[in-house]
Image (spheres, rainbow, N blue to C red):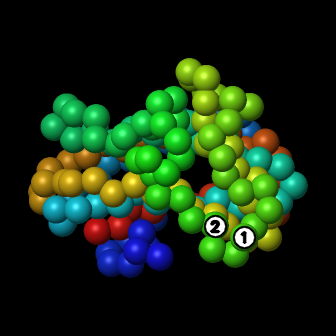
């Protein structure tokens, strides 16, 4: 999968996490290439992850498209991949929105599925990344957020 090739920076890695309500995760990165991808890998066997309000801001501008999952089908701005045909894979759903009406709702069983988006960056410029994440169940689960260039 192209979202995992190149230079990688792991922003967040959770494994066998206990349930938690929506939590804000924030990061800053400095672009080293003119194209960057933010990718998420999700697995949640007994329950679901809820991911919402994804934001990437550079030079005061929002560059992540449809971070609240409000305006488009899943694949219009996002690349979605379920390479092992895992059951309960990710969908846009009204089940657990942090804000607005929708979020990415994912309970991928036995294998991770992936959500990513690529965007143009300026080498040397700082970017702010944030997203809200809720874990609705306990182990077995994993969540990874990665920047690739």
Observer-nearest of 50 and 19: 50
Residue 118, image x and y in percent? 33, 57
Q: Which labelled disc corresponds to residue 85?
A: 1
Observer-nearest of 109 and 8: 109
Residue at 73% x, 39% y is 20
Q: Quadrant of residue 87?
A: bottom right
Regarding residue 85, the answer to whether it shows in the image is yes
Crowd band around label 2 with a 10 angstrom C-alpha radius: few (<14), some (14–19), many (20+): some
Observer-nearest of 103 and 74: 74
State the separation of the CA atoms marked 2 and 1. 5 Å
Q: Quadrant of residue 117?
A: bottom left
Q: Secondary structure at mark 1?
A: loop
Give yes or no for contact between labels 2 and 1 (Cβ–Cβ under 8 Å).
Answer: yes
Residue 42, image x and y in percent? 64, 59
Residue placed furthest toward the right: 46
Residue at 78% x, 42% y is 136
Total numbered circles: 2
Dot 2 corresponds to which residue? Answer: 82
State whether residue 145 is above or below residue 3. Answer: above
Residue at 21% x, 54% y is 120
Crowd band around label 1 with a 10 angstrom C-alpha radius: few (<14), some (14–19), many (20+): some
């Amino acid at each position: 999968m192209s979202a995992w090739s190149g230079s990688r920076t792991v922003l967040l890695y959770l494994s066998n996490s206990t349930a938690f309500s929506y939590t804000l995760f924030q990061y800053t990165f400095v672009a080293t290439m003119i194209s960057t991808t933010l990718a998420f890998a999700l697995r949640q066997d007994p329950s679901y992850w809820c991911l919402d309000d994804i934001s990437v801001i550079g030079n005061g501008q929002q560059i992540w498209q449809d971070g609240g999952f409000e305006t488009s089908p899943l694949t219009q701005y996002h690349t979605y991949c379920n390479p092992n045909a895992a059951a309960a894979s990710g969908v846009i759903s009204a089940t657990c929105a942090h804000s607005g009406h929708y979020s990415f709702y994912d309970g991928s069983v036995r294998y991770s599925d992936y959500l990513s988006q690529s965007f143009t960056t300026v080498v040397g410029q700082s970017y702010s990344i944030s997203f809200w994440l809720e874990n609705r169940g306990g182990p077995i689960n994993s969540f990874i957020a990665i920047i690739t260039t």
